Amino acid sequence: MDSELPVSGHLTELRKRLVVSLVFFVAAAGVSFNYCSLLLGILKRPLSGIVDKLVFFSPQEALTVYLNISFAFGLLLSLPVILYQIWKFIEPASGDKFKKKAFIFVGGVFASFVSGAAFAYFILIPPALKFLLGFAGSELQPLISAQQYISFVVWTALATGLVFEMPVVSYILTKLGIINSRALRAKYRYAIVGIFIAAAILTPTSDIFNMLLFAAPMLVLYELSIWVSKFAAAGSQA
């Protein structure tokens, strides 16, 4: 995005970046759709030993499930390209501090998102499922909708992936001079309150157990963000 371009030039550039991003997303979603059965098996693994099969309750639900899976993995596969297009649009206006640092931006954001999604898949979701389904006891038999389960897993992974962007956001905002490590440390108590509110909003269920599962890594990431901010500030002064 060149700050000297007229508004029409910015709109043309934005449209170009959006078209490229959309083309890659659709292509990635199409490829993912061909492997939906395999991907569904992967997403079902946290249910292993708890529920044997997922069910659906309407004629179109199975198709909806496969489309949701293909869109989710299509977004994941095309995310580096989308991030690169975002970077190329904002790079001209970012100043010398971020010139020719596309790899750091794209790599950092993508790695953080994937780390968050993996953390949700391996660490958050399995105990959350056992905790929630454990209330059924022997008198109730779980019958889980495929669409609701996939939405639960995808939303949890997406929300956790976004939360894991905190250190990256801290680095960028510090480089821009908007925040610093001292301010983040001084606002720690307010951050704790905000984190628990965010965890309550992002948690796909309303129980306190899952809220704490979300809040714990967010507290760690906030502390990490402080150190990242300190490192970014030291790098700017060097």
Image (spheres, rainbow, N blue to C red):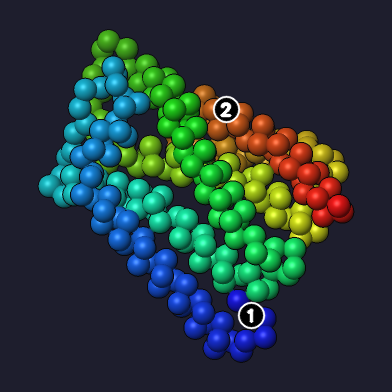
Looking at the image, residue 236 sits to the left or right of residue 34; the answer is right
Q: Sort mark 2 into few (<14), some (14-19) or many (20+) by Cα contacts within 10 Å.
A: some
Please name the residue that numbered disc 1 is placed on: 2
- Nearest to the observer: residue 160 or residue 107: 107
Indicate the position of residue 96 as horizontal and vertical percent values.
75, 68
Q: Amino acid at mark 1?
A: Asp
Q: Outermost residue toward the left? A: 59
Q: Which mark is residue 159?
A: none
Instruction: In the rendered view, tell whether residue 49 sits above or below residue 236.
Output: above
Q: Which mark is residue 212?
A: 2
Residue at point 23%, 45% (across, down): 35
Q: Is residue 14 visible?
A: yes
Circles 1 and 2: CB distance less than 8 Å? no
Tell me which label, 1 or 2, sits earlier in the chain.
Answer: 1
Instruction: In the rendered view, tell whether residue 95 sits above or below residue 32.
Output: below
Looking at the image, residue 80 sits to the left or right of residue 77; the answer is right
